[in-house]
């Protein structure tokens, strides 16, 4: 079972604290077994949460051995991070623990130095302050969350739930994550005013956006061999205009978007069917099994067969 430690700092935002507790508590594996055990940890037994005081069952020792540490936001994001907390987080990171922040939780996580050089996000209203206080970070103010592998950050409030569902999907696959999303009355991939980043910089375009009809067409034609010229012709614009609009509305290029869409469809087929890997590669538009395996591993970090063993039904 995966252990999640939720770190409660002084002036923790109650909503941010409760989001991972609720989200991971709802994750159920086949047969109804819980997917996670949850520890609420703090430096001191009692923590000021603004409207109330909370008592944490675990001290900082609860961070040791956790698979994931979540740092919720606080009402005082620029407060000095206690040395004991900083050292505990650094030690956990050195041991390979995955870490994620919600909202202004990016500030204490950034204060450890662990996010230096990485692309990160936080609540849009705090983005400039985060960038000014931590110039080594690459702050993206317009995304819901950013996944750097070991370190993840999310925007404010409900974006923390997007992040938690993404982590559940990483750990146990789309079926378990979709079930947790339904119990939370939340779409597994939310489309809204902010673009949503998932692993490997794939971005969902909001409904009603100019590119939406083209993206629907691409999704329906993943099996076809498509060039940039083909996509431009379908859109009725020049390749230069197409590339510019993709950059503006999705944050990536047309072919990168297409490759990621193909891999996501392949993930779904690996999870839900017993089709041979070669057939799945062809179904999602790869010209050869080798090209499919190479692209799949480059995008997900594992081979198609390894992914199926981990997440297949």
Image (tube, rainbow, N blue to C red):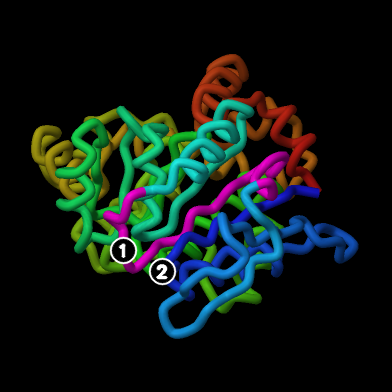
- Is the magenta region chiefly helix, strand or loop? loop
Q: Which residue is mark 1?
A: 76
How would you rate the neighbour count of disc 1 (Cα within 10 Å): few for under 14, some for 14-19, many for 20 or more? some
Q: Residue furthest right?
A: 31
Left or right of 241 in this view: 137: right
Query: Residue, x 86% and y 65% (percent of image)?
Result: 32
Judge whether residue 62 is colored magenta. yes
Residue 230 in the image: x percent, y percent? 27, 35
- For the question of whether residue 88 can be seen, the reply is yes
Q: Which mark is residue 311?
A: none
Residue 195 in the image: x percent, y percent? 30, 56
Q: Which residue is mark 2?
A: 11
Asked whether 150 or 63 is in front, the reply is 63
Q: Is residue 134 above or below residue 4?
A: above
Residue 258 in the image: x percent, y percent? 38, 38
Q: Which residues are magenta?
A: 61-80
Report helix, strand or loop for mark 1.
Answer: loop
Judge whether residue 64 is colored magenta. yes
Label 2 near label 1: C-beta < 8 Å?
yes
Asked whether 110 or 148 is in front, the reply is 110
Query: Residue, x 85% and y 59% (percent of image)?
Result: 30
């Amino acid at each position: 079972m995966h252990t999640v430690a939720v770190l409660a700092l002084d002036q923790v935002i109650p909503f941010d604290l409760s989001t991972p507790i609720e989200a991971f508590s709802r994750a159920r594996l086949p047969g109804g077994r819980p997917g996670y055990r949850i520890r609420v940890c703090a430096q001191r037994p009692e923590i000021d949460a603004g409207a109330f005081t909370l008592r944490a069952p675990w001290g900082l020792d609860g961070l040791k051995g956790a698979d994931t540490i979540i740092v919720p936001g606080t009402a005082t994001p620029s407060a000095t991070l206690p040395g004991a907390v900083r050292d505990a987080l650094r030690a956990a990171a050195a041991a390979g623990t995955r870490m994620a922040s919600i909202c202004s939780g990016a500030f204490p996580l950034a204060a450890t130095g662990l996010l230096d050089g990485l692309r990160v996000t936080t609540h849009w209203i705090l983005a400039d302050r985060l960038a000014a206080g931590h110039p080594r970070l690459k702050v993206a103010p317009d995304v819901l969350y950013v996944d750097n592998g070991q370190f993840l950050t999310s925007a404010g409030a409900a974006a923390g739930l997007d992040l938690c569902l993404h982590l559940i999907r990483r750990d146990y696959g789309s079926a378990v994550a979709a079930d947790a999303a339904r119990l939370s009355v939340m779409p597994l991939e939310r489309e809204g005013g902010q673009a949503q980043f998932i692993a490997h910089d794939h971005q969902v375009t909001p409904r009603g956006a100019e590119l939406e009809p083209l993206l629907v067409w691409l999704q329906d034609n993943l099996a076809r061999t498509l060039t940039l010229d083909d996509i431009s012709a379908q859109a009725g614009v020049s390749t230069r205009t197409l590339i510019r609009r993709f950059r503006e509305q999705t944050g990536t290029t047309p072919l990168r978007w297409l490759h990621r869409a193909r891999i996501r469809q392949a993930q779904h087929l690996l999870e839900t069917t017993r089709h041979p890997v070669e057939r799945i590669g062809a179904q999602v538009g790869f010209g050869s099994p080798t090209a499919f395996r190479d692209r799949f591993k480059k995008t997900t970090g594992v081979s198609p067969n390894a992914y199926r063993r981990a997440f297949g039904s």
